[in-house]
Image: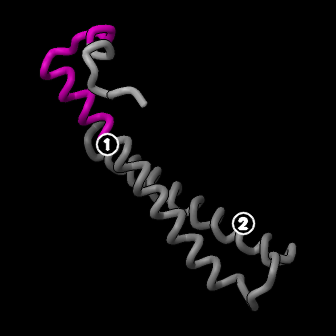
Amino acid sequence: MSDLYSSDDLSSSPTLSGKEADAEFQQFLLVERERAKLQAQIHEFSDICWEKCMDKPGSKLDSKTETCLVNCVNRFIDVSLLITNRFSQMLQKNSGF
């Protein structure tokens, strides 16, 4: 495995100023936080939907249970996106954009 911080890797990449590197790092952190939040939401939705849709344990899902799980998670995602979009619109409207 190669060393991530070897001088060969650093010499071939473009040099960023301190502010540019900090901004790039902050953007990276923001993206990773959002990705982690989305993944946590999906896990939460899956847990809720599992409790709602699963009748009995079995070796495989029947089509009714699978459909219930898919529809339930999709409904949660749709509602989350709707709320996020509405909130974003309200912020834009209030800030005068």
Residue placed furthest toward the front: 1
> Above or below — where is 25 with respect to 65?
above
Q: Which residues are magenta?
A: 11-29
Lower position in the chain sequence, tag 2 or tag 1: 1
Secondary structure type for disc 2: helix
Query: In the shown orientation, is residue 93 left or right of residue 80?
Result: left
Q: Is residue 14 magenta?
A: yes
Q: Residue at x 18, y 29 (%)?
A: 22
User: Label 2 belongs to which residue?
Assistant: 70
User: Label 1 belongs to which residue?
Assistant: 30
Picture coordinates of residue 16, whole percent (x, y):
21, 15
> Above or below — where is 89 with respect to 97?
below
Picture coordinates of residue 90, whole percent (x, y):
36, 51
Picture coordinates of residue 28, whole percent (x, y):
32, 36
Report the amino acid beneath label 1. Leu
Secondary structure type for disc 1: helix
Q: Residue at x 24, y 36 (%)?
A: 26
Viewer-nearest residue: 60 or 41: 60
